[in-house]
Image: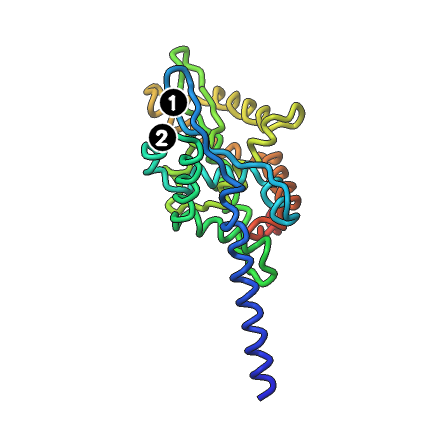
Amino acid sequence: MKRILIFSLLLSISYSTSSQNASSLQSNFSDIFQIKKEKYGDREYLNKTVNTLEGDQKLKELVNNNKLYLHYLLLNFSDQNNYQQLLEQESEKELQKEFINSLERDSLFNSVMHKISEKTFNPYYVPDTVSVDELLNVAVKYFTIKDITEEGNYAGKVCAGINGIQKTLSERKPHLEAFSFSTILKNMKEEKESMHHEFVDAIHELYKLELGVDKEDRLLRAQGVMFSLMRNNVQLKTLLFSEYENKKEYLPFVIITNDL
C-alpha cells in the first residue's frame, strides 16, 4: 500500500512540474515576441522579431541564446493568415496585443514552442532521437540554386523562405529546420571557415558538369547536385555537430552521432 501511495505521489509531482514548466515559454510570449509596422519604399509591412530578455535566468538564457532559432519558428510555424488584419491595426499597442493573442491561439505554434519549453524546463522530458542523415537531409535544403542568369551563371541563396524544404520534405521538422538554418546563417557571417565559402566552392563544382541544355532541366539537376555536394561537405557536418554540442541543453532532440 505504501508503494502505491509513493508511486502516486511521484506521478503527481511529475505531472505538476511538467504542467508548470511547459507553460514557461508560452506564458511569456508578450515579452519574447514583438511586431512592428515598417516601410520599404511606399510599401508598409510587418516586422516580427525576438526580443532580448532580462529577468528570469533560465528563460533569459533560453531566449537570448536561441534568437535566430526562435525567429525561424515564428516566421515558419505560426499562422500567417491574419497578416492583413494585423497590418490594418492603427496603434502599435493594439497591433502588439492582437499579435500576441494570435500566437496564444495558434495550436501549431504552441505545440512547437511546447517542445523547446519542455526540454529546457522539464527534467522528465524525453527528447526525440534523430540520426545525422536526418539532420543533413534538412540542412542541405537551405543551399539553394535559385536561378540561372542570362549569362549562364548559377545564382545561389541561403534563405529561410526560399529553399528546398517544402518541395522535398514530405513531413516538416520544425526543430531540425530551425536548428539547421540558424546554425548555417550564423556561420555564413564568419570571415574564416565560413559556409559561404563552402557554398561558393560547391557552385564552382557545378560548372564542371554539363547538366543540360534546357534551362529548367539544368537548374533542377544543379540543385540536386548541390544537395549531394553539401551532404558530403565535411565542414557542414562539423559545424552542425559543434553547434549541437553548444546548444543541446535547449534542443528538443538528440542526435545519434555514431555515423558522423
Q: Please give the name of the residue rendered at 57% of the width and 89% of the height, measured from the top-left corner.
A: 1
Evaluate if marks 2 and 1 touch, with contact meaning CB atoms under 8 Å apart.
yes
Quadrant in the rendering for residue 102: top left
Counting residues from the N terminus, which is met first, the one under dot 2 or under dot 1?
Answer: 1
Q: What type is the residue that disc 2 sits on? A: Leu
For disc 1, the neighbor class at 10 Å (few under 14, some 14 to 19, many from 20) is few
| Image location of residue 107, percent across then percent down | 39, 51
User: Label 2: few (<14), some or many (≥20) within 10 Å?
Assistant: some
x, y percent for residue 255: 58, 50
Residue 227 x %, y % = 47, 34
Query: Of the residues shown, which amino acid type is indicated by label 1?
Result: Glu
**What colour scheme governs how the chains and residues are painted in the rendered image of this protein?**
rainbow
Q: Which residue is mark 1?
A: 44
- Measured as percent of width and height from the top left, residue 170 is found at 37, 45
Disc 2 from disc 1: Cα separation: 8 Å
Tell me which corner region of the image, top left, top right, bottom left or bottom right, holds residue 186: top right
Disc 2, SS? helix
The quarter of the picture where residue 127 lies is: bottom right
**130 is higher (above) or lower (below) than 184:** below
Residue 87 shows which numbered tag? 2
